[in-house]
């Protein structure tokens, strides 16, 4: 083991747990927040073009969730395996895991993009587009499809860096692209008069630059796992392990996309204003949820490394600390959000109907924030330790097994209010379900070294 790799191993398995989680969690939280700021930036700048244009961003967000799902399938799958291998001092397969996940993610997203171009309008209608939103969504999604393979492989590289404990490098790659997108949006949309196409071009260019920065870390030897064509051999055993380990992330992100489609379809019954309002609320809520994800992603490499090193007491300590930090932060956001809801919605759209629908929906979302940290932490714990069945079950709950039935039942019985309440109710039932699963996991965790 190289000297710098030995030092990294000692940090991950011996440094005090709380400062270590904070050290890794801050860059990942910043990455998540800045990435979501640029999503909010798209929403803000495009909303100035009109209600239908604002709704188009929400429609395309469902497609971007699909791309993220593919990236997380291979990125979290390879990353978790790499993290546990490094904790067990087994470095032999890390380059193969990284390269296989990178190549497969690029190829699959490329094929999917070609199919989306061929069936563009039916695809956008499937995502929940109305006929008035469709022209805007078509212009915007074209550039998202072009950048798709680079966006997906950026997710792969970002996750591998995080699981190696190189959160700072992952942050640099993502934040650079996000900042460029925020700068590019107003220039291309208004300065050059490109409208919603300008937002798509800005996102595409920022994703290409972010991809280049992340790839350079792997090619310049900044990582323990190397990307190299000589590492690529279609080893079905390793590919199967990557996909099996990453499947909970695919399920979670994939259901998020399906849920976004269904939410748009239910909201479309009440017109473009409802679609626009729920789109804004979804972006705002996910921005806050990103804090919980960022903290949890700081916990994942600590969990994976120490589980691989059989230092289970450190896994337990890291979980308790990270869960507590998540509750404090999201609880604070929830209280502030309840009072600031009209102001936050008004930043994006002054339309009175959008403001009314969005304010009510966002206040319900704030209530659900108290229940989110345990759901996130339990899922990440199960996935980082290779508990695939538990990880899959917990990943299916929030955006699928609970959300979709609740949306269908309440949306068809009490209408718009039911649509606004669906996500926080799903968060509550997810909390009740994962709590006993998590308690059982830690009760059965063996002593250190066993």
Image (spheres, rainbow, N blue to C red):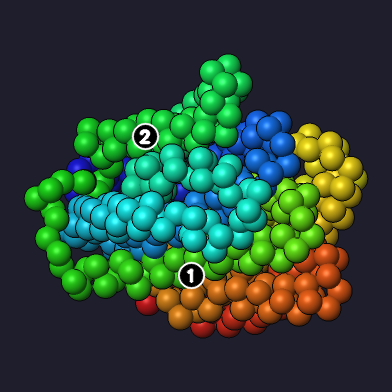
Q: Residue at x 55, y 74 (%)?
A: 396
Q: Residue at x 27, y 33 (%)?
A: 216
- Residue at disc 1, secondary structure: helix
In the rendered image of this protein, does residue 220 appear above or below residue 309? above
Residue 250's x, y, as percent?
Answer: 44, 66
Q: Mark 2 points at which residue?
A: 208
Residue 178's x, y, as percent?
Answer: 51, 33
Rounded to the nearest whole Å, what is the CA distance between mark 2 and mark 1?
Answer: 26 Å
In the rendered image of this protein, does residue 404 appear above or below residue 444? above
Please indicate, yes or no, whether residue 216 appears anywhere in the rendered image: yes
Residue 390's x, y, as percent?
Answer: 50, 79
In the rendered image of this protein, does residue 349 appear above or below residue 224? above
Q: Quadrant of residue 373?
A: bottom right
**Callout 1 crowding tier (Cα within 10 Å): few <14, some 14–19, many ≥20:** many
Q: Mark 1 points at which residue?
A: 251
Q: Quadrant of residue 400?
A: bottom right
């Amino acid at each position: 083991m190289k000297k710098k790799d030995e030092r990294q191993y000692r940090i991950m398995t011996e440094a005090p747990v709380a400062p270590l989680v904070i050290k890794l969690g801050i860059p990942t939280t910043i990455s998540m927040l800045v990435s979501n700021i640029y999503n909010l930036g798209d929403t803000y700048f495009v909303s100035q073009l009109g209600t239908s244009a604002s709704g188009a961003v929400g429609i395309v967000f469902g497609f971007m969730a699909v791309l993220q799902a593919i990236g997380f399938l291979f990125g979290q799958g390879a990353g978790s395996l790499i993290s546990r291998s490094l904790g067990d001092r087994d470095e032999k397969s890390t380059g193969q895991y990284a390269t296989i996940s990178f190549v497969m993610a690029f190829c699959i997203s490329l094929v999917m993009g070609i199919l989306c171009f061929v069936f563009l309008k039916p695809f956008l209608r499937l995502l929940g587009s109305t006929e008035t939103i469709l022209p805007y969504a078509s212009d915007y999604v074209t550039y998202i499809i072009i950048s798709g393979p680079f966006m997906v492989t950026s997710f792969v590289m970002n996750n591998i860096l995080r699981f190696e404990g190189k959160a700072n490098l992952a942050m640099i790659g993502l934040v650079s692209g996000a900042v460029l997108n925020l700068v590019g949006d107003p220039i291309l949309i208004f300065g050059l008069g490109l409208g919603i196409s300008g937002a798509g071009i800005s996102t595409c260019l920022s994703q290409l630059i972010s991809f280049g920065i992340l790839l350079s870390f792997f090619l310049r030897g900044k990582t323990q796992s190397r990307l190299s064509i000589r590492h690529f051999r279609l080893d079905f055993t390793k590919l199967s392990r990557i996909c099996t380990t990453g499947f909970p992330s695919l399920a979670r992100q994939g259901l998020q996309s399906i849920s976004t489609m269904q939410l748009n379809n239910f909201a479309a019954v009440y017109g473009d204003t409802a679609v626009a309002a729920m789109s804004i609320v979804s972006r705002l809520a996910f921005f806050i949820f990103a804090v919980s994800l960022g903290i949890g992603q700081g916990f994942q490499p600590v969990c994976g490394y120490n589980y691989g090193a059989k230092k289970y007491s450190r896994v337990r300590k890291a979980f308790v600390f990270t869960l507590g930090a998540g509750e404090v932060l999201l609880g604070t956001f929830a209280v502030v959000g309840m009072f600031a809801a009209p102001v936050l919605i008004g930043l994006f759209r002054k339309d009175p109907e959008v403001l009314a629908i969005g304010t009510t929906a966002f206040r319900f979302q704030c209530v659900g924030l108290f229940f989110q940290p345990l759901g996130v932490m339990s899922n990440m714990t199960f996935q980082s330790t290779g508990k695939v069945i538990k990880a899959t079950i917990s990943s299916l709950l929030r955006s699928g097994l609970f959300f979709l039935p609740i949306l269908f039942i309440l949306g068809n019985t009490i209408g718009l209010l039911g649509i606004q309440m669906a996500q926080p109710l799903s968060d509550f039932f997810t909390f009740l379900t994962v709590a006993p699963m998590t308690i059982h996991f830690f009760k059965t965790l063996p002593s250190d070294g066993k």
